[in-house]
Each structure stands twice: as structure tokens, then as C-alpha cells.
Image: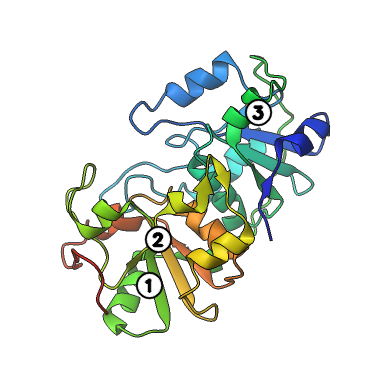
Amino acid sequence: MNYFIEKEWLLEHLQDKNIRIADCRYNLGLSEEGYDSYVKDHIPGAVYFHLSKDLSGPVSVHGGRHPLPAIEDLQETFSLAGISEETTVIAYDGGEGSYAARLWWLLNYVGHEKVYILNGGYKAWKDAGYPTNDTIPTYLKTEFKVHLNDKIFASQEEVKKMVEAKNDETVIIDSRENKRYLGMEEPIDKKAGHIPGAINKVWTEGFENGRIKSIKEQEKRFKEIDKDKQVIVYCGSGVTATPNFIALKMAGYNNVKLYAGSFSDWITYEENEVETGKNVR
């Protein structure tokens, strides 16, 4: 199944009442740049979701750099955006894919599966000369209903058990760039390396020129992984692993979880080991 929609489809359905467009543009280095860009111009009718304020909870000792929001906070955020069970959400970011994928995963986590990502993001939309405006829309508040899907969530405790078991029943995927996985460099977190036993599948390899690769190409990326195994994906803080989560689902992997706290959470537990170099297990 493909969880991305094309800009032509969205253009045709721009006026549909049951469509809610979600602008997720963000810059990790400049946290307000995404919102400032949204205020300047966006796809007509789009609501803005801020990664740090709407799609993450407060940073604490544990939980990583982008902790999951409290369920009641997510419920309020989606209610204020006018999202109901009948709503199809179309998420987009600047074209990276990861910020929109974070919203996609969160909506699936709370049981709302009618969500898709705009292939190519806002860049593709603007490059096509499609309409934009600077109007900040308001929608009637709904009563967003939560049906928690915790089958797609992995806690630190669960990952730790998998690591300690050292068996072949679970595959842990580090989605970060190879240098960070190997521990050669770490520009953000206090420790370098990866969770013991993890393999490296860089999330950006699932895209080409800002567009998601085909289902066949995603299958090739993960071909050495048995589809019957439990797969857990992580990254630095639970954002850039979400495109890998989606790519695995596209490729036919049904037992996939996101370690939401990811590496930045893992290293806050002093007893947790960290490996460097290539996994040789």
C-alpha cells in the first residue's frame, strides 16, 4: 500500500469538506522557520502543526529530544484542527518527508488511519504553480476520538529486552546517516554510536528527488529482512525514523514499531550500552 498522494489529486480535492490539509514544515536548527514560512504562504486551507509544540511533548530526563505528546494533548490538537473520524488528513512538509511522516505516524498511533503524505511536499506544489495563500483558516472544533494503536509503539523497556535477548526474532533498524550510526560523528546527542545489534538503513534512501520511491524499490531496500519478524525502527529523536516505518509498511512488513524516544532517549539510561562500528551479529 502507498501512503503518499500526488499533488494533482490534492488539487482536484482542494475544496472537499472532509479533507484537512496539514502543513508540517520545520527546521531543526531554526524552530520557528516552518511557522514563519506557513504564515507567508501555504496550500489553501492548511492548518499548521509545529513539530516541537504540537507533535512533541515537553523535554524531560527521559523520552528523547522530541518526546511523544500526552494523548490528551494530541486529542485537543486534532480537535482544534477540526479533524473527525470522517476527515482525511493530507500532511506535507518542505519536501523532506520526515516531518509530515511524524504527523502520519502520530495519527495512526491514536487510531486515525485516513492520513496521507503529499509526495514531493510543498516544493513540488509550488514548483507546479499550484495555488497558495496566506489566509490562516479556522475550523469548528470537533471531538477527536482516540483509539490507541500501541502495536506500532516500542518503549525503551521493550527495546532493552530485545537487545538483551540477542536473538534473531527482532530486527532493530537505525535510520540515521551512516556516520552517526557508526559513531564516527555525533553532532546532536551526548554519546555516539548505535543501539547494540541495530542495522543501518538510512531513511533518506527511501526517497529520490524529494519523492518516495516505489513499493518495489522499498522492497529491495529491506530484502534481507524476513517479513515475519518484528521490526523496530529508531533514529535520533523519533522523527526521521517515521519515513522508514512507512517504507517498511509499503514493502509489506506488518509487524513494525517505532521506538519513539529513539537514540536520544536510549542514552539517558546510564546502564544502556552503545555500540560503534558496523553491527557484526
Q: Is residue 163 left or right of residue 141?
A: left
To which residue does mark 2 refer?
201
Amino acid carrying label 1: it is Glu
Q: Quadrant of residue 210?
A: top right
Label 1 to label 3, Cα distance in Å? Answer: 40 Å
Residue depicted at x 39% and y 48%: 67
Helix, strand or loop for disc 2: loop
Residue at horizontal 18%, vertical 48%?
185
Q: Is residue 168 left or right of residue 119?
A: left
Q: Residues within 10 Å of mark 1 (few under 14, many from 20)?
A: few
- Say which quadrant the C terminus sits in: bottom left
- Residue 158 point in image, percent of width and height: 37, 72
Q: Is residue 261 left or right of residue 80?
A: left
Distance from label 2 to label 1 (Cα)? 21 Å
Q: Which residue is pictured at 24% across the width and 42% down the height?
A: 188
Q: Return the residue nearer the eye: 108 or 96.
A: 96
Q: Residues at badges 3 and 2 in contact (C-beta under 8 Å)? A: no
The residue at which mark 1 appears reads as 158
Q: Is residue 120 visible?
A: yes
How many discs mark residues in the rendered view?
3
Residue 150 showing in the rendered view: no
Q: Nearer the viewer, mark 1 or mark 3?
A: 3
N-term mark: 3 or 2: 3
Q: Earlier in the sequence, mark 1 or mark 3?
A: 3
**Numbered tag placed on residue 125 in the rendering:** 3
* Tag in front: 2 or 1: 2
- Amino acid residing under circle 3: Trp
